[in-house]
Amino acid sequence: MKQNLFIFSNSILRKKDNTLLIESNPDKEPAYEADIDLQEPDVIIPPPTDSEYSSKKFIPADNIESIFTFGDIRFNTRFLSIASNYGILIHSFNYYGKYIGSFLPVSSINSGSIAILQVNFYNDYEKRLKLASAFVKGAALNSVANLLYYKYRNIELEEEIDNINLLINSLDSSLSIGELMGIEGNIKAIYYKSWKKIFKKEIEFTKRVKRPPDNMINCLISYGNAVLYGVCLNEIYRTGLLPSIGFLHSPGENRLPLSFDLAEIFKPVIVDKTIFKLVNKDLLDENDFFLREGIFTMKNNIKKVFIENLENRLKSTIINEKLKRSTSYRTIIRLECHKLINHLKDKEEFKPFYNKP
């Protein structure tokens, strides 16, 4: 199975035959003193092949699904050519994990008919509203599933679960996208406030703050969500959907709203579960974060710990009731895209993935 490649150091990406060559960039110093020593390219997943030079790492192109970069990266058209030939998507983020943009290779499966279906569905407000409601409901149900998991382990979360379920029941009567997003905001406020009960130690976190993240937990959420948007974009691209036409999130300049829509369903399943594990198993703490220019961010070694655990979560499997076999969460995201396509074709109602507690 192809894997994602994450690059945290300032690097130069080159083509070497059918191999990706990653070199450290001697012209660029590590961004901040809080970073670990980056004398060689700092990459994870999959492990690079051995090289006689510590400043170079070679990775077979056919092993790579996509590349996520978080440092100053240089590459040329020859590198983009091999990425295109092997269908490798490249997602770029700045030092703080803010999404910059993506390189999407020419695809043989992009379908004009699917794009037309998306546009027609978007322009039919009643159909769009129902589909947008499904994305919000999926996110809310998976949030409740997380709370139920901890309720079954004797954490008092009954009030929060009941209040979120009341809001879920009100989704079907929403008359506008704005009203839906208002309900979504109320659900998330209750959900995030409950996290202090889930954490086994005292953590500073009471509400979601995005721009910029103001503490360790908000930093983890923002960073994890950004990576998940890239993962969802991969699957949207592979299935021929148009990422620029969303239903809950409106199309706009420099945005890929369908990846935001899809990610809503999986944030509680992938990102939040990873955060709970890392905090409760003491795999990170507030000393692993620092404030720079008013923004909380992670040291590079903790970024690697977080990404490795996020990837492990995506690779983990559950029994798919429809397929009757074990299926990874990454595959489930792709199946969700196929479900959406069938819904756009009026073949089946879109019922969002629900991760049973």
Image (tube, rainbow, N blue to C red):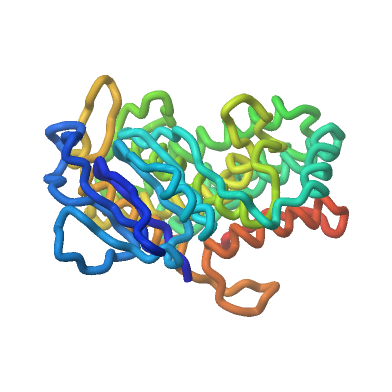
Is 198 rendered above or below residue 72? below
Is 240 rendered above or below residue 95? below
Q: Nearer the viewer, residue 145 or 292?
A: 292
Q: Name the residue at 38% across, 32% down.
A: 206
Picture coordinates of residue 302, whole percent (x, y): 24, 48
Q: Nearer the viewer, residue 66 or 162?
A: 66
Q: Name the residue at 24% across, 50% down.
A: 23
Snapshot quadrant of residue 249: top right
Q: Nearer the viewer, residue 32 or 352?
A: 32
- Residue farthest toward the top in the current orientation of the protein: 293
Picture coordinates of residue 212, whole percent (x, y): 37, 25
Q: Nearer the viewer, residue 143 or 231?
A: 231
Residue 202 visible in the snapshot: no
Picture coordinates of residue 156, whole percent (x, y): 43, 50
Picture coordinates of residue 175, whole percent (x, y): 80, 29
Snapshot quadrant of residue 174: top right
- Residue farthest toward the bottom in the current orientation of the protein: 324
Q: Name the residue at 57% across, 28% down.
A: 254
Q: Name the residue at 49% across, 55% down.
A: 88
Total label count?
0
Residue 183 visible in the snapshot: yes
Snapshot quadrant of residue 335: bottom right
